[in-house]
Structures are given as structure tokens and as C-alpha cells.
Image (tube, rainbow, N blue to C red):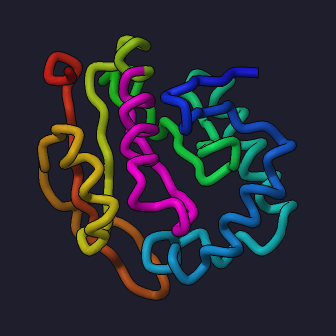
Amino acid sequence: MFKLIIDEHVELRYVTLKDALALYRIVDENRDYFRPWFGWLDKMTDESIMTGFIKSAMKDYGNGQGPKVTIWYNDIMVGFISHQNYKVFNKSIAIGYWMDEKHTGKGIMTKACKAMIDVAFERDIHKVEIYCATHNTSSRKIPERLGFTEEGTIRAAEFINGEYVDNVVYGILKDEWQ
């Protein structure tokens, strides 16, 4: 089993079917916290839906889409992060992530993103992007902290809770990454 130890507290592990219940519980316990940011939230109604999500993530990874991993803090699963939207000819990917509210503010997600960026550039990716809802200030701090460039806003990028939400796009190129 893949395990990437980031520091004495944080590690990343490839998602497996055995993670379905723990990931579902994170989603279920954080519905109010996640509601403004994720249109898929209300479709995640039980562990079997999470199992389907994990199967899809594992298939994507098998097709070269990049790692789909769980985030662990002091040996407790606290979230999920993945490479997404791999564009083969452009050599670019996006990073998507979510985490249990109880574990925010500890730098865990910033460390996880940094590790996933390192993995991307080791894979000969040229550009990494992160998309955040314009009003999700906590999520936006992560690419800003990591030296990404704010590249613009995609209007009405996602349909969440009955309304369209704009996304800010952040990007960093391989030769800009330190």
C-alpha cells in the first residue's frame, strides 16, 4: 500500500475500498461545513455511494489520471486530495481537496497540497491548477500560501445548491515551483 509520509503528523495513502465508511463519515459529519462548496454533497447519501466514488477514483488512477489519496493526521483519516482533470497534451492537472472541519487551521491541507504538487512535477506535469469558489476564502489561502498565481475567474463555473458559483483559478508552472 502506498504511503507518503509528509511529517511526523501528516501522511497520504492511496484510497482503497476499505476507506469508504471513514470517508463517508467525514462527509456526513461535515455536511453543513461542505454545503457551500460541493454540488455533489446531497448525492452522497450512504457508504455505497462513497464506494462508487472510490471505485471511480481507483479506475481514474489506473488510467493515468494521477493519485487519489486519503489524508491522515496522527493516524486518523481527515480528508481527501487528488489529481484531477489531467490534460495529456498540455501536461496539466488540477488538485481537488476536502477535509474534516475539526482539523482545519493546522496546516494539514497546505502540506498535503505541497506533496501532491511535488508528485505532479515528478510526473513531468508542466502546470498545476487549483480551482476555488470565489467566496471560499479558507480554500483560496492554500494556493496563495504556496505561491500560485491567481489567473482569473470562471463565471458560473459550478452549480451548487440551486445557484451558479464563480471559481477563481490559480496556477503554478513547474519552473516556478520551489
Q: Nearer the viewer, residue 151 or 81?
A: 81
Determine the residue positioned at 68% across, 75% down.
29
Determine the residue positioned at 48% across, 39% down.
84
Would you say residue 89 sits in the magenta stretch? no
Up-down relation of residue 24 to residue 151 (above or below): below
Would you say residue 115 sits in the magenta stretch? yes
Q: Which of the 4 image quadrants contains residue 146?
A: top left
Up-down relation of residue 4 to residue 107 (above or below): above
Quarter containing the N terminus: top right
Determine the residue positioned at 83% across, 57% down.
21
Residue 125 falls left or right of residue 32 = left
Query: Residue 10: percent from the left, percent from the top?
Result: 54, 37
Residue that sits furthest to the front in the current view: 8
Q: Which residues are magenta?
A: 93-118
Residue that sits furthest to the bottom in the current view: 162
Q: Nearer the viewer, residue 42 or 21?
A: 21
